[in-house]
């Protein structure tokens, strides 16, 4: 351990319990904020994939519905996992809404 590390550790140990708690909370909030940013990026990627799938379904017509529905189910599962992670890590962040429709209906 270097002299600088020992000095930093000594400084942390000499903090009052309240200041240590405040420092801990600040570090946790920064970590949670970073997690929220990453979750938001992932959700945006999922939204883009959904938009592409809807466009593919329009191009493929009824023949592509099985493929599109399977892919939408996968994306719905990913989105659900992100919501669960967000609710465990950051219970007051807000809700991410599920995909509007998990299945594209075939025209008869």
Image (cartoon, rainbow, N blue to C red):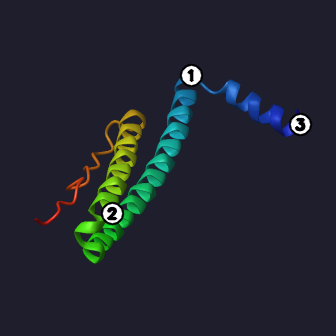
x 35%, y 37%: residue: 87
Give the total number of marks visible in the rendering: 3
Up the image or down, 61 lies above or below 28; here it is below
Marks 3, 1: nearer the viewer: 3
Q: Which residue is mark 3?
A: 2
Q: Earlier in the sequence, mark 2 or mark 1?
A: 1
Question: What secondary structure is found at the residue carrying circle 2?
Answer: helix
Residue wearing tag 2: 50
> Going from the N terminus, do you reach mark 3 or mark 1 first?
3
Residue 47 percent location from the top left of the image: 34, 62
Asked whether, in this view, residue 32 is left or right of residue 106, the answer is right
**In the image shown, does 38 or 72 lie closer to the viewer?**
72
- Name the residue rendered at 63%, 27% in the picture: 15
Residue at 17% in and 63% down: 106
**Gap in Å between the C-alphas at discs 2 and 1?**
49 Å
Q: CA distance from mark 3 to mark 2?
A: 52 Å
Task: Give residue 17's mark.
Answer: 1
Residue 7, quarter of the rendered image: top right
**Residue displayed at 29% across by 77% down:** 59
Quadrant placement of the C terminus: bottom left
Query: What secondary structure is marked by label 1?
Result: helix
Location of residue 100 by image quarter: bottom left
Q: Are marks 3 and 2 in contact (CB under 8 Å)?
A: no
Who is closer to the viewer here, 5 or 71?
71
């Amino acid at each position: 351990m270097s002299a600088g590390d020992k000095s930093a550790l000594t400084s942390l140990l000499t903090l009052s319990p309240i200041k240590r708690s405040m420092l801990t909370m600040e570090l946790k909030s920064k970590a949670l904020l970073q997690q929220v940013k990453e979750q938001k990026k992932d959700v945006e990627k999922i939204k883009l994939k959904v938009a592409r799938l809807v466009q593919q379904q329009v191009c493929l017509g009824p023949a592509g519905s099985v493929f599109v529905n399977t892919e939408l189910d996968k994306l719905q599962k990913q989105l659900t996992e992100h919501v669960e992670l967000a609710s465990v890590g950051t219970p007051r962040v807000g809700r991410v809404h599920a995909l509007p429709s998990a299945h594209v209906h075939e025209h008869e």
